[in-house]
Image: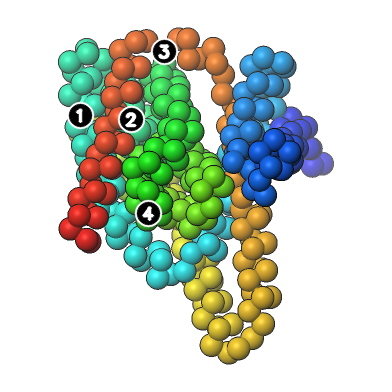
Amino acid sequence: MFKIDKELVLGILLCVFSAIISIKISKILGSKLFELEKSPISPIIISIIIGIIISNLIYPKISNFKNGFDYCIKVFLKLGIILLGIRLSLIDLLQYGSKGLIVVIPCIVTTIFLVQYLGRKFKISRNLSLLIAVGTSICGATAIVALAPTIKAKKSEITYAIANITVFGLFAMLLYPILANFLFNSDIISVGLFIGSSIHETAQVAGSSLIYSDQYSEPDVVGIATITKLLRNTLMVIVIPFLAHQTISSNDDKTKLKDIFPYFVIGFIIFGCIRSAGDYFFTANNFNFDLWNNFVKTLKMIAEFLLITSMAAVGYNTTLKKFKDLGIKPFIIGLLSASTVGITSIIIIYIINYINI
């Protein structure tokens, strides 16, 4: 007989409820406190804060619902990103994707080589240095978990690396929208490239780009940042086997493409194609474009709600006690690694804009 996992269901429901509350609080703050039609405080931020406060300060036993939180992060996040593809046309995908590669590749290469060098100088294990490097430059915890077994990393090294990139990723998620607006002065392509190439986790990129979108009324930034981040994720297919081969040559053939490839990028591209085809079909045939536009808006709302829900799960999964256990040396390397990605991204974007690529 089919058995329902109560912890799984309750964890999901808690995240969904937190997302609803976050949206309500955001709207109230916008209309009552700031007297604005659109709140300057994103529900993404509120959902994370709710999760962290409840799980660390009010009811620590809520970690019993971890299966539900993990499900939201693994499933809702990916589904939300897939549906975000409806924001973009195929032309946008090709345009921003090519620019994204120009920015992303130098960020990854520079960060990995610098962190390995710093790891040797600080006398930190090679494995921990590599985990921090891939977590910062490619895809956060996903890249760390994908690389760890191929280099036989210890559990303590994995925990250190994930806690490290979580700290700096959260800071970047909250601060980079403001920094991006200051540096690029509402140039949405540059803003999207910067956010997508410099923030660690896919969820954090989605959250940061939505924060920018909410605060500066530039919804297209979300799509550009998402494409750039998905390009970074896809490069795991090349980078992780290469690093594994460097570290343990005999284990290179154990790294399977199907285990590390971010398949949700395919769904994102498919929905981008659907958007392109729909725009063309309804425009060319003089059909009711409002009907198509409402459909697109509905999918956007669903995508954003799924992302807010997954970010609530990130908050519930964030344990403040782990941060106390971080050694100062890995912490410094994590800071330098995060700074390297951000600075490299800024430099490359300025060069691209200067030579008008």
User: Residue 8: x and y, percent?
Assistant: 71, 34
Observer-side mark, 2 or 1, equals 2
Quadrant of residue 86 within the rendered picture: bottom right
Q: Place residue 188 in its image quadrant.
A: bottom left
Where does residue 102 sit, x and y in percent of width and height?
Answer: 25, 53
The residue to which callout 1 is attached is 114
Are the residues tagged 2 and 4 within 8 Å (C-beta)?
no
Label 4: element kind: loop
Q: Which mark is residue 338?
A: 2
Marked residue nearer the N-terminal end (2 or 4) = 4
Query: Which amino acid, by three-letter code, is at mark 2?
Result: Ala
Measured in 3D between alpha carbons, the distance from the residue under mark 2 to the one under mark 3, in whole angstroms, is 16 Å
Q: Amino acid at mark 1?
A: Leu
Which residue does the numbered mark 4 point to in the structure image?
187
Mark 4 or mark 1: whose residue is earlier in sequence: 1
Residue 239 screen position, x and y as percent: 28, 42
| Type of amino acid at the residue the image marks with label 3 | Leu
The secondary structure type at the circle numbered 3 is: loop
Image mark for residue 132: none
Q: Is residue 295 visible?
A: yes
Determine the secondary structure under disc 1.
helix
Measured in 3D between alpha carbons, the distance from the residue under mark 4 to the one under mark 3, in whole angstroms, is 37 Å
* Mark 1 vs mark 3, CA separation in Å: 20 Å
Residue identified by numbered label 3: 326
- Sequence-first disc among 4 and 3: 4
Badge 2 or badge 1: first in the primary sequence: 1
Question: Quick one: label 4, few (<14), some, or many (20+) residues within 10 Å?
Answer: few
Distance in Å between CA atoms under marks 2 and 1: 11 Å
Q: Give residue 151's quadrant in the image.
A: top left
Q: Amino acid at mark 4?
A: Asp
